[in-house]
Structures are given as structure tokens and as C-alpha cells.
Image (cartoon, coloured by chain):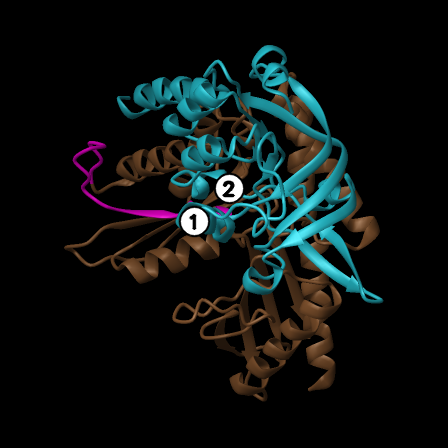
Amino acid sequence: MSETTVREKLRAGDIVLIKGIVLTARDKVHKHLLDNKPSPPELPFELAGAVLYHSGPLMKEENGRLEVVAAGPTTSHRMQMYEPFIIRHYGVRGIIGKGGMAADVIQAMREAGAVYFHATGGAGALLAGKIKKIEGVWMLDEFGRAEAMWAFRVEDFPAVVTIDATGASLHAGVERISKERLDSLLST
Amino acid sequence: MLRLRDGIKEIIRKTAISLPRDVEDALQKAWEAEPGGPGKEALAAMLENTAIAKSASKPLCQDSGTPIFYARVPRELSFAVVEKAIIEGVREAGRSVPLRPNAVDVLTEKNSGDNTGLGFPEMYFKQCEEDTLVIDLTLKGAGSENAGTFYKLPDERLNAGRDLEGVRKCVLDAVHAVQGRACPPYTVGVGIAGTRLVAAALSRKALMRKLTDEAEDHRIKELEERLLAQINGLGIGPMGLGGKCTALGVKINHAHRHTGSYFVDISIACWANRRGRLIW
């Protein structure tokens, strides 16, 4: 994704279908990227302009070929402490996950021009169907199938933009309203 | 016990690929009631996913969870035999369903690869008078397990005292704190007891109750209904994207407490509250 697309076209609340390559990145990949700051050729994928997918897919080997069985989003909150660095250092343009991310990620997205796509958690079977091809994998032996970085070619992958590059966050809005309602329910 | 192992493997498969009827019905009703927007879209994706998983015999979610078994064992059968069959059934299901390997050794950080290890899967055994073996199973995803929490009453921050009104405040606070991170609409399990262990066991077990089941005690029943309405009033909505449905049900279990202690434990199940039962 280009910076222009991200900054000018995508706004919190937009319902989108994603097409192209997404790179899965979960707890171990995030920790590795922050601790060791790998770059090519050690890191085989271009992260500048890339879309990361917070997902630990369930894979199956059939006749020597790997197949994606279920691959929904995992909770992005766990990647919170690593993501501001990864967005700034690598120039990642998009994150697909669930549950949203907090203030310092939103700040990094605003500065670097990146957005957060929210996918439906638990919809592993449905979303696996949107993965058309496995284009590559990194750190498979080290981290295992659920934690490796997979390059998936996706089509019509449904998501909602919930944090945009202007800093608007649908999650922050829901949190504010629910806090007001909580306070009134606690005082009764 | 080859056949018991196969029965366990089959109930794991069924539990991983399909939702209990009451949960699916509740999601359908939630979708009908949601006026529109991203929250309604999320419910539609959940229902579509449920249909795909069942027809293709694929796990609903890539996180096939921690398998947790509650076995009621007749006198003629030893716990050890049932335990062995469960472990073998989990290994078999891991290969055939398949399940994602989720068991990690905390010292070496190595994944055992077959969902077994120290305390994994989780198993509870109880002797029963009946002559059938009944095994209840849930596959508990990590996202929702991480959302569980507990309170000690009184709680000054919440102005929550040692009574059901205090319990109500704890539950609302806990759900608000989680927001949409654990895949709502949730089933919220609550345990009230005098020790942390019993409170946690009760709140977890509460998630095994059907959504349609009603608490025997009218005070508990009223609190469950009131909490469900109030949680849905928070507006967190499906997947935390805003909307009317944040929870499908609230289930409260309680035990006698020590005069000096009052624990409230809260367990949360994601929308895909995967429960199964094997009657043997």
C-alpha cells in the first residue's frame, strides 16, 4: 500500500475487502523484530509498505503440501509494546488484527502513515477461505507453524478500518461511550 | 479402551467445528436485533464462519484452544483409564481434525506439538453413582482466557461491598475493561466463593451452562438477567465495534465463603463458546 492511499483514502469506519500479500506476525515474530532488528537478506520479505496480519494460522500437511485450515486474527493487544517500533523502523503500512491497539501505536500510525484493519475474531474457517496462495514463510523451524511469518496472498478479505492515519480510532470512541455508561451503572 | 479414545476424538472434532445449538441461536437473534454497521457485519461473519466450518468439517477458529475436560466417572471405571483415553484422544484429534498445537513448556518455550504436557489438557474427575461415563468438554481460546480476572470484596475503587450489588459492579467493571479484545458477544461466567481457587473453578464451570438454562435461586437468576441487560447497555458491541450485543449470557455460580473472604472471579468465553458432551 502506498502512503497516499493510506493517508487519503482510508478512514476509520470504512468496510473494505483486502487483496494482495499479507504477512502474518504474532508474539514471537514481533519480539524477534524488536530484539534483533533483522534486515534483508536475513529477513526475506519487504516490510516497507507491507500489511502485517496478527494471526497464528492452523495449517495441515496434505500429501507433502501445506494447506491453511483456519486463520482468523489474534488479539492485537499482545503486540502493543512492539508495534510502534515496527511501524516506524520498518515502514509497515497496515496491521490486520482484532481488538484494536492503544495510544502509542495510533501515534506511530499517524506519524508514519499506517492504518489498522479489524477482522472478525474466531472466523478462522471463513478467513482461511480468503487465502488463495502461500507465497513463502520465514522462521518456520525456529517458531513453528503458528508463530512463523507466512506470506499469504489474499482476495476479498473482509475487514473494517478502525484506526486511520489521522489518528481516528473507532475503538477509542466505543471505549469512551462505554465508560460513560459504566460510570452511570456503577453509581446506581 | 480404544473405543473410548475414539469417542473422545470424535467429541473433540465436533466441538472444534460446530457451535452448541443455544449459542448459534443466540448469535442469530443478535444479528437480527443489531440495526447495522460494523458490529452487524461481524455477527454476519460469525454466522457465515459457523456454517463453513460445519459443512467443511474445519475448526471454527485457528485457536482450537486449551482442551478442558470435566469427567463424571462411574465406580467400575478408574480415573487413570479415563485420563489415558483423554490424552490419547487429544493427540489423535490433533492430527485428524486438526487442532493447532497450543501446549508450550514454560522452561524451554518448546511447543510439545500435540496439545499434551504438564497440566495440559486440563482434566477434572468426579466419581458418580450413575453407570454411564459423562465427559463435558470445552475448547477454551487464549484470547478469552486472558480476559478473565478476579476481585476481592470489598473493593474501594468500585465502591463495591460484600453483597450481590458488589458482585454486579465487579462484573460490569471487568467486561468494560476487556472491551472487544476477547471476541464479543461474550458468555460471562461468574464465581462467588471464599477462596480464589473455588471462585475461579466456579466461574469457569459457569461457562458450561447452556444459555437457555435458568439459575435455581431467584436472586441469582435476577442478577444474571440484570447484568446481561446492563452489559449490553455498555455499547461495546460485537467484536467491540459498537452495537447492542456485547454478551449472549451471564451465568453465576456460588459457594459458601469464609467469614473473612469474598472472592468474585470472572471467566469470559468468546462468541464461539465451544462446548461438547460425550455420554459413554
Q: Is residue B171 left or right of residue B74?
A: left
Q: Are marks 1 and 2 on the same chain?
A: no
**Of the residues shown, which amino acid type is indicated by label 1?**
Asn
Q: Is residue B145 left or right of residue B163?
A: right
Residue ID at (36%, 22%): A179
Task: Please report the bounds of the magenta region as a residue range.
Answer: B143-161
Q: Quadrant of residue B239?
A: top right
Residue B193 visible at all: yes
Please tell me the colour of chain A: cyan
Report x, y in % for residue B221.
45, 40
Image quadrant for the N terminus of chain B?
Answer: bottom right
The vertical placement of B4 against A15, above or below, is below
Mark 1 to mark 2 CA distance (whole Å):
10 Å
* Chain identifier of the residue bearing label 2 in the image: A
Report x, y in % for residue A161.
59, 22
Main SS of the magenta part reads: loop
In the structure shown, which secondary structural element does the residue marked by tag 1 occupy? loop
Give the class, few, some or many, for how many residues have Cα within 10 Å of label 2's Cα (few <14, many ≥20).
many
Front position in the image: A110 or B208: A110
**Of the residues shown, which amino acid type is indicated by label 2?**
Thr
Q: Are marks 1 and 2 in contact (CB under 8 Å)?
A: yes
Report x, y in % for residue A152.
71, 43
Report x, y in % for residue B145.
46, 51
Q: Which mark is residue A178?
A: none
In the structure shown, which secondary structural element does the residue marked by tag 2 occupy? loop
Inspect the magenta stretch and tell me whether residue B160 lies in it: yes
Q: Residue furthest top?
A: A8
Q: Which residue is mark 1?
A: B146
The vertical placement of A172 against B271, above or below, is above
Q: Which residue is mark 2?
A: A75
